[in-house]
Amino acid sequence: MEKKFSVVTGGTGYVGLTLVKYLLSQGETVKLLLLEDHPCLDGIDVEKHVGNICNPIDLDACFRGAETVYHIAGVVDISGKKEDLMWKVNVEGTKNVVESCKRCGVKNLIYVSSIDTYPDKFSTEQKSELSSYSEVGLTSGYAITKAIATQIVLDAKDDLKVCCVQPTGVLGPDDYMGSSIGAMMDLFIKGLFPVSMSFGRYNFVDNRDMAKAMYNAVKMGRSGECYILGGEVITVDQMMGYMADALGRKKPKIKIPKGLLLPFVPLISGIMDLAKLPPMLNSFSLSKLEENCNFSNEKAKRELAFTPRSAQETIRDTVLWHQKKLKGEL
C-alpha cells in the first residue's frame, strides 16, 4: 500500500511554507505543486511537482493518490492591475482544484479563503462566518474572486470533505517571497520608515497558528464550513511600537494623521512602483485600516483548537526574522 500524502499548492508563500514545515513536523509526507522551484525549499524534505493550477492535467498528475489537498495558491493584488489574472487563478484555478480532487479521489480539501469575502466592511458589529458567499456587497477584485472561489469549494461538500479557513492579516516568519507588510518591516528595520500613524487598526493572525488550525481542520473540521482565523486587533501605532521594541529602539514620535497623509499617497505609491516594492500604501490599504476588523474566532477555537498567540509575540518574531533575512543569516 502506498503511503498517504498531502499536497500543498502555493508552498513557497509564507503561509504555505509555514504549513509545509508544520505538516512535516507532524510526520506527514508532503508534495508541493509549484510554478517553479525556490531556494526557500532547499533542504526541506518534500516532493516537488512543477505545474499550474490553471492546467487540469498538471493538477491530476500531482493530486493522484493524495489524501488531503491544502489549496493556498492565489493572486493577491491591491494595485488594481491584475484583475484578469486574479479571476483566472483565484476563481478558475480553484474550480480546477476542486474538480481534480473529485477525479483523483482526494478525501479532504482545505482552502485558504479570506476575511475580505465579508460585505458591510464599515459596520460596527462583530462578524462571524456566513452560510454562503458571493460578490454581492463587495467592491475589490480580490474580494470578489475570493468570495466566488470560496463558494465553489463549499459547494463540493457532498463529494469530499471541504473546509475553508479565513485568515485576517497574516504575519509571521518565512516571508521569502516578499509581502506588502514584510516590505514595510524591511524599511522600518533599515530606518527608512521613521514615522507612525495616528489612525488605523487591524486584526492580525500568526501564520504558525494558522498552519496548526489548517492541519486540525482535516480531522476536526466539519465539511462545508468556514472558519475565521483572527487574532488580536491592534492600532498602527501599537504595531510600530512592537516593532521598535523587538529591535531595541524607541517608537517613532511623529504620528501622521490621515488628512496630512492622503495628498501624498499617489506620490508614495509611484515611488513604491519605481522601487519595485510590493504596494503597501495606497488608497486601498488606507481604507483597510479603517474597516471593521472585529472578527469572531470562537468557532475556530471551539472546533479547530485554534489558539492565537499575542500580536506582540507575532510582530516580534516577524521583525526579528526579517532582520536576519536582511543580514543574510537565513
Image (cartoon, rainbow, N blue to C red):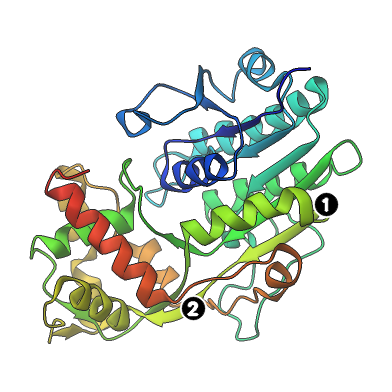
Relative to 20, is 316 on the left or the right?
left
Which one is nearer the viewer's eye here, 265 or 113?
113
Residue 90 position (above or below residue 289) = above
Q: In percent of the image, x 83 and y 52: which residue is there?
A: 224
Q: Outermost residue, left direction?
A: 191
| Dot placed on the residue nearer the N-terminal end, 2 or 1 | 1
**Is residue 137 at least partly visible in the picture?**
no
The three-letter amino acid code for the residue at tag 1 is Gly
Rendering coords of residue 70 (x, y %)? 63, 39
Relative to 219, is 203 on the left or the right?
left
Which one is nearer the viewer's eye here, 262 or 281?
281
Q: In percent of the image, x 65 and y 85: which residue is there?
A: 125
Label 2 sits on residue? 232
Residue 143 position (above or below residue 36) = below
Total numbered labels placed on residues in the image: 2
Q: In percent of the image, x 24 and y 76: which residue is there?
A: 240
Rendering coords of residue 113 (x, y %)? 62, 51
Q: Outermost residue, right direction?
A: 158
Label 1 sits on residue? 224
Rendering coords of residue 53 (x, y %)? 59, 25
Rendering coords of residue 143 (x, y %)? 57, 54
Q: In percent of the image, x 51 and y 34: which residue is there?
A: 84
The three-letter amino acid code for the residue at tag 2 is Glu
Relative to 104, is 177 on the left or the right?
left
Q: Quadrant of residue 266?
A: bottom left
